[in-house]
Amino acid sequence: MIDVLVVEDDLVAAEAHRLYVERVDGFAVAGVVHSAAGARRALGRLDVDLLLLDQYLPDGNGLDLCRALRAEGRLVDVIMVTSARDLTLVRAAVSSGVVQYLLKPFTFATLRDKLERYARFRRGVDRAEQADQTEVDHLFATLRGSEGAQLPKGMSPPTLDAVAAALRGAGDGLSASAAGDALGMSRVTARRYLEYLADHGLAVRQPIYGQVGRPELRYQWASG
């Protein structure tokens, strides 16, 4: 059983996250807290494997808490939960050892996928004391959702995760321009990731006809 500490300042969201985690086989909620200080106190008395950690907390932010825990030698894993779509924050989270990055708003299915991938990663690590390069690559691919496939040169798994999460959260879909604006990247870069998702069946393209020129493509998450 993987024990999860939910760290979320919004009481309604915290309860929803607790219910979501408890619906996933193999996971249990060790506790729910609403601040960085509460997380520290809970980690001092509870056996926790994974933090479901909100970025914006009333007494600090999740990334600073994560860095402090790493500096203290605490090896608890972290799934960062945030509404922030700034790729600078994504990069900082990855460099701080965050294993997954989850953009609000998200559905139960999205969180379940992240948790199940994390569980497979944990099982793979626990099974072997040593691993060759292929096994290490497979373990990291399990976390990033790219088992059996290499991303094209110049594309990164965290950025792909961020684009996919933004697309899942956009009920009416996103154009490349809108995705770029939301995520702080160029339209060309956003379109490259959106095209990758569409080519792999994770998104569908929809032409939007304006008054002049070529139709603009809007991308929508392929819910099926």
Image (spheres, rainbow, N blue to C red):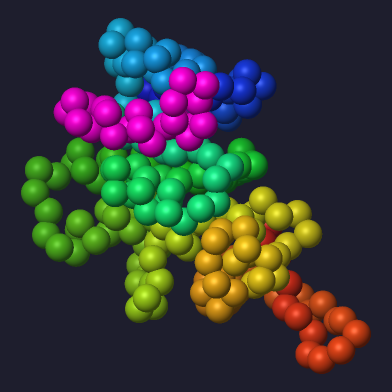
Q: Say which of 178 and 119 sits in front.
A: 178
**Left or right side of 64 for 7:** right
Magenta region? 52-74
In the rendered structure, does residue 126 fall within the stretch colored magenta? no
Tell me, yes or no, if residue 196 can be seen here: no
Question: Measuring 32% from the left and 26% from the top, which residue is drawn there?
Answer: 49
Residue farthest left in this picture: 130
Image quarter of the N terminus: top left
Residue farthest top in this picture: 45
* Quarter where residue 221 is shown: bottom right
- Give the image location of residue 58, x and y in percent: 52, 21
**Left or right side of 205 for 151:** left
- Give the image location of residue 10, x and y in percent: 61, 23
- Give the image location of residue 73, x and y in percent: 17, 28
Question: Measuring 76% from the left and 75% from the top, which residue is drawn there?
Answer: 206
Residue farthest front in this picture: 59
Residue farthest right in this picture: 211
- Give the image location of residue 80, x and y in percent: 44, 39
**Left or right side of 130 for 44:** right
Question: Measuring 25% from the left and 46% from the top, which residue is drawn there?
Answer: 124
Query: Against 201, is 117 above or below?
Result: above
Image quarter of the C terminus: bottom right
Query: Against 36, is 84 above or below?
Result: below
Query: Against 49, is 181 above or below?
Result: below
* Quarter where residue 183 is shown: bottom right
